[in-house]
Amino acid sequence: MSEIPDDLYYTEEHEYLRASDEEDVYFVGITDYAQGELGDVVFVELPAEGDSFAKMATFGTIEAVKAVSDLFCPLEGDVVDVNAELDDDPSLVNTDPYGDGWMIKLRLGDPSQVTDLLTADGYRLHIGG
């Protein structure tokens, strides 16, 4: 069964937002369910710090043994940090998707929009859990 922390926000495309210590800045990654569906992650292509994305715009790709998938920005915002550790060890997405396997830190353009995303209960229903 997939781990779905209660304190995160989720998209129907299997990305999550986790609050950081900075106001209006969130960690973005893919869910435990998504990494399980993908299989062994072998490469992650991420944007540069300072890039801006609209809600649901593609911000990168993730390559697994089984498939290559787009990564979607959960909400509009600016990238303030990129997880460079994934360059050397993309498997962190598999082993710790909500911790060391985060992908970008995003400063939200409109932080009130987080309520538009799924709660943990909503995401469980979405994946049939």
Image (cartoon, grey):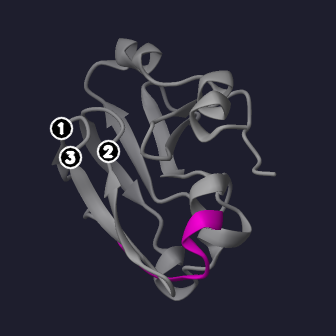
What's the CA distance linking mark 1 and mark 2? 7 Å
Would you identify the image quadrant in which residue 90 lies? bottom right
- Residue 5 x/y as whole percent: 74, 36
Q: In the drawing, what numbered circle is on residue 30?
A: none
Percent from the top left, x then y, of residue 105?
A: 43, 48
Q: Residues within 10 Å of mark 1 (few under 14, many from 20)?
A: some
On the image, which quarter does residue 12 sit in?
Answer: top left
Q: Are marks 3 and 2 in contact (CB under 8 Å)?
A: yes
- Which of 110/12 is in front? 12
- Name the residue beneath numbered marker 1: 54
Q: Is 87 situated left or right of 37 in this image?
A: left
Q: Is residue 46 visible?
A: no
Q: In this figure, which residue is indicated by the disc labeled 3?
A: 57
Q: Is residue 23 visible?
A: yes
**Rendered location of residue 115, percent (x, y):** 46, 14
> First in sequence: mark 1 or mark 2?
1
Of 79 and 45, the residue lying toward us: 45
Q: In the displayed structure, would residue 79 be above or below residue 43? A: above
Kindly report the distance in space between the C-alpha atoms of the residues bearing marks 3 and 2.
Answer: 6 Å
Residue for point 46% across, 82% down = 87
Q: Are marks 3 and 1 in contact (CB under 8 Å)?
A: yes
Say the numbered circle drawn on residue 73. 2
Residue lying farthest front?
A: 128
Disc 1 residue type (three-letter):
Ala
Label 1–label 2 contact, CB within 8 A: yes
Point out the stretch of residues depicted in magenta. 36-46
Q: Nearer the viewer, residue 71 or 80?
A: 71
